[in-house]
Amino acid sequence: MVSRLAFVCVMSSLAMAGCASKPPSGLDATRTAYVPVADKQSLLGRDQAGEPPFSAFGNSKRGRSSGPLAGRTLKVSSISGIRLRDKEVILTFDDGPMPGKTDNVLEVLDRYGVKATFLMVGQMASSYPAVAARVADHGHSIGGHTYNHSNLANAGNTRALNDIATGNSAVARASGTHVGFFRFPYLAQTGALRSAVANRGQVILDVDIDSKDYFTSTPATIAARTMDRVRARRKGIILMHDIHTRTAAMLPLLLSQLKAGGYKVVALQYRRSRMPEALVSAGTGETGSRQM
Ligand SMILES: [Zn+2]
């Protein structure tokens, strides 16, 4: 229990820093971001014991997006395929899955009939496989976010790619789905890493609108701040984190304001590329980490 609490606490403090934010100066980029993982058996037991019965979620989990807020479904095999029109947004949730908190996010998304993409940390997915599987079962897309939320910008290509692959495998095993998307923790990356990830067939998700839900703002403040940025850009990929209680609390506010503003939530679906790997777009080749 102690180790589990330590794991969750470290996870929470990491998320407070925000995965889109530049890591604090002095942080060893190659350092393992998490404390040693908690006992897996106890975590699994906790996960399985704590989850509500499947019937509690109704029968519409695998359905497509529906309702006035639901937009197109974009099937993409590379980053260049993500072309949003005016007043279209994509919802993304990083750093989970987390029992209870991720479930609350799923409930709100179901209520509004929209689909999102969840970028999961491998270690979290391994700890809470039932929650990871539930996200996929609700019809959302799944991506990787490394195994332990490392800053990969200075990790060296071999080590970074191993971390990405280990994380992807853990998320695939837990969720039971293909892990078609990827987001760099802290958005810390190099052009070489972007190319390598793209050439392995994953679609890299960047961030256009940071909700900054890792700050301890009220749900209304987070929703208002996010809507301000949405209105300024008129479209884009929105970053949120499904490991915070306040994120699920603010989500109905955000989605109702998007609906009132005539925005549409675009669902992303991964499609395997038919092109040779070497020809897959490697994105912008941007180097370094970004402060969002
Ligand atoms: Zn993150």
Image (cartoon, rainbow, N blue to C red):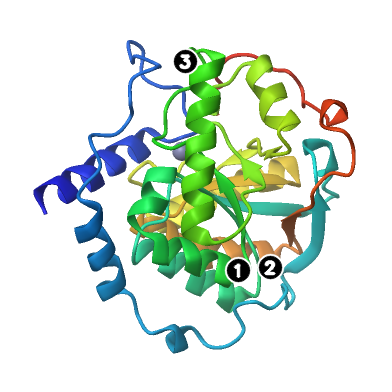
Nearest to the observer: residue 34 or residue 262: 34
Residue 90 screen position, x and y as percent: 68, 52
Distance from Cα at disc 1 to Cα at disc 2: 5 Å
Label 3: few (<14), some (14–19) or many (≥20) C-alpha neighbours in 10 Å: some
Nearest to the observer: residue 157 or residue 258: 157
Nearest to the observer: residue 281 or residue 186: 281
Residue 197 screen position, x and y as percent: 67, 30
The image quadrant of residue 148 is top left
Residue 270 screen position, x and y as percent: 74, 52
Task: Give the residue displayed 61% in from the left and 51% down from the top.
Answer: 227
Residue 115 lies left or right of residue 283; in this view the side is left
Label 2: few (<14), some (14–19) or many (≥20) C-alpha neighbours in 10 Å: some
Task: Give the residue displayed 64% in from the left and 77% down from the top.
Answer: 62
Residue 17 lies left or right of residue 91; in this view the side is left
At label 2, the amino acid type is Lys
The image quadrant of residue 191 is top right
User: Disc 1 marks which residue?
Assistant: 256
- Classify mark 3: helix, strand or loop: loop
Task: Give the residue displayed 20% in from the left and 50% down from the top.
Answer: 39
Asked if the residue under mark 3 is in contact with the one under mark 2, i.e. CB atoms within 8 Å, the reply is no
User: Disc 3 marks which residue?
Assistant: 155
Residue 175 lies left or right of residue 179; in this view the side is left
Residue 278 lies left or right of residue 57; in this view the side is right
User: Disc 2 marks which residue?
Assistant: 259
Is 68 drawn above or below residue 283 in the view shown? below
